[in-house]
């Protein structure tokens, strides 16, 4: 790993150089599929986090607000969208790195919705 943008992640024991390579080979399913509509804030946040993490590709995916940012915990709609987007990107990272759940082969992260991985 020669890219200094990911140095902090490479230094983490949970990611390391091998994990960063898996992220680079994986696809994060976090983009909104609005068919011409402006992307929802949660998808914009998830996209920024996924790009910053170093995913090799991004694809359309759903974000499960009820699982990632329950209304009883976060009432403000904008805050709820930001939290759901950040947790969706984290869920995609966990899937690509096979952390906190079932192992996912590189390149197949997030086959379902981004809300399927435990957000805690």
Image (cartoon, grey):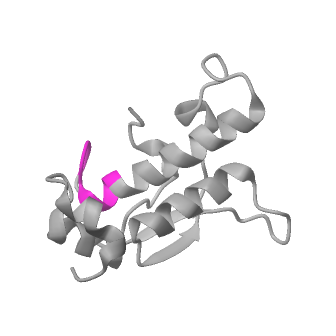
The relative height of residue 6 versus residue 116 in the rendered view (above or below) is below
The reply, left or right, for residue 78 in relation to residue 14 is right
Tell me which segment is drawn in magenta: 94-102
Instruction: Quadrant for the N terminus, please.
Output: bottom left
Question: Does the magenta-highlighted stretch encompass residue 95?
Answer: yes
The relative height of residue 99 versus residue 49 in the rendered view (above or below) is above
Nearer to us in this view, 28 or 8: 8
- At 61% from the left and 31% from the top, the residue drawn is 66
Res 18 seen here: yes
Occupied quadrant, residue 117:
top left
The reply, left or right, for residue 80 in relation to residue 12 is right
Question: Does the magenta-highlighted stretch encompass residue 116?
Answer: no
- At 17% from the left and 63% from the top, the residue drawn is 16
The reply, left or right, for residue 46 in relation to residue 50 is right
Direction bottom: furthest residue = 2
Nearer to us in this view, 112 or 28: 28
| Residue 76, x across and y down, in percent | 75, 27
Direction front: furthest residue = 4
| Residue 64, x across and y down, in percent | 59, 42
Res 107 seen here: no
The relative height of residue 119 versus residue 26 in the rendered view (above or below) is above
Nearer to us in this view, 55 or 95: 55
């Amino acid at each position: 790993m020669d890219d200094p943008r990911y140095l902090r992640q490479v230094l983490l024991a949970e990611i390391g150089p091998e994990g960063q390579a898996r992220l680079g080979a994986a696809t994060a399913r976090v983009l909104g599929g609005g068919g011409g509509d402006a992307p929802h804030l949660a998808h914009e946040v998830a996209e920024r986090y996924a790009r910053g993490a170093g995913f090799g590709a991004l694809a359309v995916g759903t974000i499960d607000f009820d699982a990632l940012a329950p209304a009883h915990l976060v009432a403000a709609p904008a805050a709820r969208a930001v939290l759901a987007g950040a947790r969706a990107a984290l869920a995609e990272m966990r899937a690509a790195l096979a952390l906190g759940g079932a192992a996912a082969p590189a390149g197949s992260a997030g086959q379902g919705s981004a809300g399927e991985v435990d957000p805690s």
